Image: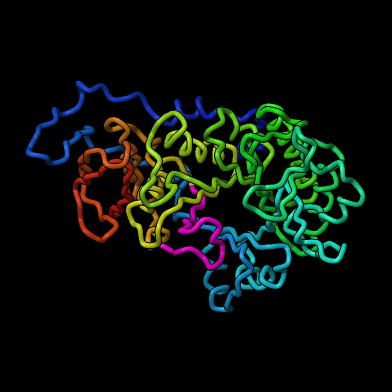
Amino acid sequence: MLEKAGKVRNLLVPLTVLLASVVPPVVDVGDLTPVIDVGGLAPVIDVGGLPPLAVPGELVPVGRAKSFWLHLNSTPVSDETIAVEAKRRAHVVLNAWEGDLLRKLKTANPAVKVYVYKDLSSTRSYACKNGKDDEHLPAGLGYCAVRKSNPEWFLKGADGRELEYGGYEGHSQMDVGNPEYRKAWVDSVVKTSKATGFDGVFLDNALYKCDAYHAGKCPAKYPDDRSFQNAYKGMLAEVQRGFAAAGLLSVGNLTNARLHAGGWEAYVAHLDGAFDEWWLTFSSDRRLEDYAEGWSRQVAQIALNEAHDKMIWVQPHFDVGDTTAFRYALASLFMTTTGDTAIAEIAKTDGYADPTAWHPEYDWHLGYPAGSYRKVADKVYRRDFTCGVALVNANPTGSPAVQVPLHRTYTDHDGKAVTSVSLRGTTGALLRAKC
């Protein structure tokens, strides 16, 4: 990949190395002001003097938070919604048959990037009627065409039976390790995507577990996770070659990469960006704390992608109106982003219809980062900006609050002036300052 400096980097920096580079050494407990028990109030952590201010022009400004819209349920969209969302969403994903909506979005804002949804791993029998595949497909290749010409591309289990996605009727799993399948898939997707006018492709189901969608049953050809992932690496390499030649962007759904050491880096090396479908908050009452495969790894995914000029879209899950989960996710995003990360929550799994909520915080401008995020207490992190600060307590939900002094006056989410913030486990805050 060519970097901004014009140099070529052949390998992505591992997440473990990147984590070490973005988190400065832990402050020695002896350097902190002693904690005084004042009858149940949150302990006060003194992190020293004022944080240094970044010098404009030396660092990349984070600017406002970006957001995206996955419109995958084919629900009607009004012209009023198009006019608004085309201007404030950085990325929109549509189905292949929504070419008219694509053109309306582009008319409203030529700069918005619009992607077509394609399943990397399956073909869909429901998209074939009376022996003929639909003109516009949710997968790369038509079920009936493949069934007739290349039935060997249907992936089989050890029992010789074809594998289907459990819980998703009509999804037949395909052999992404087959070179002929890879080429046919890429050629078809490039042709149809370019013809409709999409900027790129959203690649769903870049899988890691060989028994994904059918627990305990791996393909006979790929009986373990290692061989299964190698097949996907080859598939994504083919995507990279074909899409680059055609000028198409690629964003892959790399959900659960955090559970596989090196998995994120291995797949994203072949992509222009990645999507984490389950990022930090799995529901309003299930927020991911900091541990080896938790908060730190998911936050490091952002730093890794942005260090290599790659997009990342993150999707926290929580109930509508849950400000606690939203603020935890947004503050965590600002721990490492330099402005190329987009966020959009979801309240119901696969509820991809109307645009998600637009929060006032998306219009805040924090300015330039004053360096990396740093640890101010056990699993409590802070990152300063010229015009604000992000704070996160990544201890388990329900753990005692920690009060962090700010050393200057900031404005909180509710518009109140604050000089300190009390954060319980798995909560966060984004604060603004006059600048």
Predominant SS along the magenta part: loop
Q: Please, which residue is most extreme toward the front here?
A: 159
Count the numbered circles shown.
0
Asked if residue 397 can be seen in this view, the reply is yes
Looking at the image, residue 11 lies above or below residue 81: above
The residue lying at 64 percent from left, 68 percent from top is: 74
Answer left or right for 44 relative to 267.
left
Q: Indicate how the structure is coloured in the image.
A: rainbow
Q: Nearer the viewer, residue 197 or 129?
A: 129
- The magenta stretch spans residue 344: yes
Q: Nearer the viewer, residue 137 or 216?
A: 216
**Residue 137 locus on image (x, y percent):** 76, 60
- The magenta stretch spans residue 91: no
**Residue 400 locus on image (x, y percent):** 22, 38
**Residue 284 locus on image (x, y percent):** 38, 52
Question: Which residues lie in the magenta part?
Answer: 339-359
The residue lying at 35 percent from left, 24 percent from top is: 25
Q: Quadrant of the N terminus?
A: top right
Q: Please, which residue is most extreme toward the right here?
A: 149
The residue lying at 62 percent from left, 51 percent from top is: 167
Looking at the image, residue 348 lies above or below residue 238: below
**Residue 197 locus on image (x, y percent):** 75, 63
